[in-house]
Image (tube, rainbow, N blue to C red):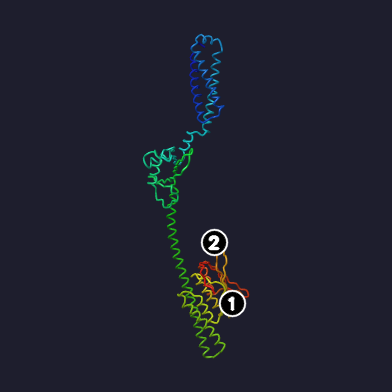
Amino acid sequence: MNLDFYIILLGTFGIETVIMLTVVTFNYFRILLFRGKIQHRILIGLQFIFEYLSLQNFLWLLRQHYWLEQALHGYGCEFMMVLQTFLTIIVLQVTAFVHKAEKKSLTKNSLKNGLDTLPGGLLFYWSGGVVKMVNSKMDEISHVLFREGIYNGNIFWDKIKERALDRSLQKDKDVYMIRLNDGKVYSFKRSICYFEDHELYEVTAYDVSREQLLNEELKIKRVKADEIKNRLRQLNDDIEQLTSEKEMLDTKRKVHDDLGKTLIMTRRYLETKDEELGKEIIKLWKLNTMLLKGEESETDTFQYSGVVHDIRKSGLEVSIEGTLPTDKNSKEVVIAALRTCATNTLRHGNGTEMYVNISKVKVKTIRSLKEKDYVKVEISNNGKVPEGEFTEGGGLTNLRRSVERINGLMNIEITDRFKVVLKLPKQTETQERW
């Protein structure tokens, strides 16, 4: 090889040394930036020294023409080139290591880059309004809303409050909703944090377009549901009224039929003068009189005393223990139960006494897993007990419907006595004592 070739080769390695020296210097500052380990700093420092000495050697060789001529017959020049190649490989490996370590470390730049990739906006500013940090998303939102960046945090927050949507349903005073021109809805929230013992405001912005759309749809559905609920309530009231009128009509029809039978039996008695028939007719007239008085009082305020008085006038003694309910719904049901049980006692049981016992109980229903206060009303008599399988008649069936209409319960117990048990929801503390 001639001398010119060696000069070109040495020059090339010299340029390479300059490049590697620059890379080593850059690596050193990078590792200082993310506070790398001390041994890594020492290693890069040694690389800088070796690269610098290698550069000086190449420059010295280029100036010594006599040495180059001697190098044609020796191995000194080849040794320097091999050493520089080895140093270059080490520098490249260290550069790759620094790059990898920089990715894993948390620096100011990496923190800012991470905040800029967030889907939501983020802003930090001091109490005076000076901006500490703002990510790209919040800056983009500010340009869309106000056609300018964020230069003062307090001014930006005041503008947010001016553009906010209706806040009647919002509980947090520092949360505002804003609809952008493209239809998106953002929720802005401000909170206070502390940085180096100084008060700092944090403002976040999140896209809640889907949630807002669901809320609006829910409001519409709620309005429709309320309309349907009101219609169902009205329909239920109409059904209850029609049912009550039908039950009343059935009762009146039965009373009138019984009255017709009583008139026919009275005519027969007048013709035959049968004493046993006369006693039966007197009993029927008392019963019909009580039922007719019950019809007359349907539109009046129900009073226990009047009902008990009518029952006693029919020849049936009534014994009441406990506190009778006085709320309108329960009172109507109890009075209907007293009349129905009195009629059945006289007509079917041939009894002379009726016993009424009232107490308080706890009841757990299907609708509510929690126990609630109920009023328990037990009505029995000293008449004969039905034989065989018992089937409810029209009076007890109508009574059961009335009880269930106010969310009560009704049971028939047949032991040594015939007993009707009512459990009515407690509505009021004001009650009538006997």
Rendering coords of residue 86 (x, y %): 55, 21
Q: Amino acid at mark 2?
A: Ser
The residue indicated by pointer 2 is: 368
Please name the residue shown 40% across and 43% down the image: 157
Looking at this view, is 409 or 379 the one in front?
Answer: 379
Tell me: residue 224, above or below residue 432. Answer: above
Tell me: residue 76, above or below residue 370. Answer: above
Q: Would you identify the image quadrant in which residue 132 lies?
A: top left
Q: Earlier in the sequence, mark 2 or mark 1?
A: 2
Q: Amino acid at mark 1?
A: Asn
Residue 283 located left or right of residue 122? right
Looking at this view, is 359 or 61 the one in front?
Answer: 359
Please name the residue shown 51% across and 28% down the image: 32
The label shown at residue 381 is 1
Measured Cα–Cα span from mark 2 to mark 1:
33 Å
Task: Categorize mark 2 by other alpha carbons within 10 Å: few (<14), some (14-19), many (20+).
Answer: few
Looking at this view, is 183 or 132 the one in front?
Answer: 132
Element class at badge 2: loop
Quadrant where the image shows the C terminus: bottom right
Tell me: residue 176, above or below residue 268. Answer: above
The label shown at residue 254 is none
Element class at badge 1: strand
Rendering coords of residue 33 (x, y %): 50, 30
Tell me: residue 57, above or below residue 187. Answer: above
Rendering coords of residue 331 (x, y %): 50, 72
Q: Residue furthest left?
A: 147
Task: Categorize mark 1 by other alpha carbons within 10 Å: few (<14), some (14-19), many (20+).
Answer: many
The tally of labels here is 2
Q: Residue furthest right?
A: 416
Rendering coords of residue 338 (x, y %): 53, 75
Q: Are marks 2 and 1 in contact (CB under 8 Å)?
A: no
